[in-house]
Image (cartoon, rainbow, N blue to C red):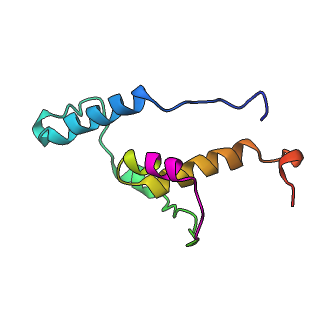
């Protein structure tokens, strides 16, 4: 890895984030303070562009059982999280020819 790579370890912080999401989901619309969010007017939408996510391919992959169970235990969207981890590794190593073995 290059010295510009930031390493993040998942742990207790992830559980804290999840409990905050539970609290937010329990709130009514009236309880959510949106006063610091500017109103969107016609000028915003005039220049807005629809950006579609990259196409995803269906694949079969073998993962260590404990890794897969841990990813699933984090909740809904585990496949997207696996993709995000792989994308972060891919982007961190773009241009690093030593990782482009065939």
Residue 48 position, x and y percent, is 47, 56
Q: In which quadrant of the rendered image does the N terminus lie?
A: top right
Q: Position of residue 10 (x, y in %)?
A: 49, 32
Answer left or right for 63 relative to 20: right
Q: Is residue 47 visible?
A: no
Which residue is rendered at x = 56% and y = 68% of the image? 56
Residue 66 or 82: which is nearer the viewer? 66
Determine whether, in the image, residue 8 is placed left or right of residue 26: right
Q: Name the foreground residue: 97 vs 67.
A: 67
Q: Residue sitting at 78 percent across and 27 percent down?
A: 3
Q: Picture coordinates of residue 25 (x, y %)?
A: 20, 42
Q: Is residue 62 left or right of residue 29?
A: right
> Could one spot residue 60 in this view of the protein?
yes
Q: Considering only vertical position in the picture, is 40 above or below 80?
A: above
Hey, which residue is sitting farthest bottom in the picture? 58
Q: Is residue 53 magenta?
A: no
Number of numbered labels in the structure image: 0
Q: Is residue 61 magenta?
A: yes
Image: magenta residue range: 60-70
Q: Residue at x 58, y 70 (%)?
A: 60
Q: Quadrant of the C terminus?
A: bottom right
């Amino acid at each position: 890895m290059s010295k510009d790579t930031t390493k993040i370890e998942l742990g207790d912080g992830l559980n804290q984030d999840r409990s905050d999401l539970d609290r937010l989901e329990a709130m009514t619309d009236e309880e959510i303070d949106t006063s610091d969010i500017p109103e969107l007017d016609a000028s915003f939408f005039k220049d807005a562009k629809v950006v579609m996510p990259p196409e995803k391919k269906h694949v079969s992959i073998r993962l260590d059982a404990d890794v897969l169970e841990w990813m699933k235990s984090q909740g809904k969207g585990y496949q997207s999280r696996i993709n995000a981890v792989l994308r972060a590794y891919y982007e961190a190593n773009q241009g690093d020819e030593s990782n482009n073995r065939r």
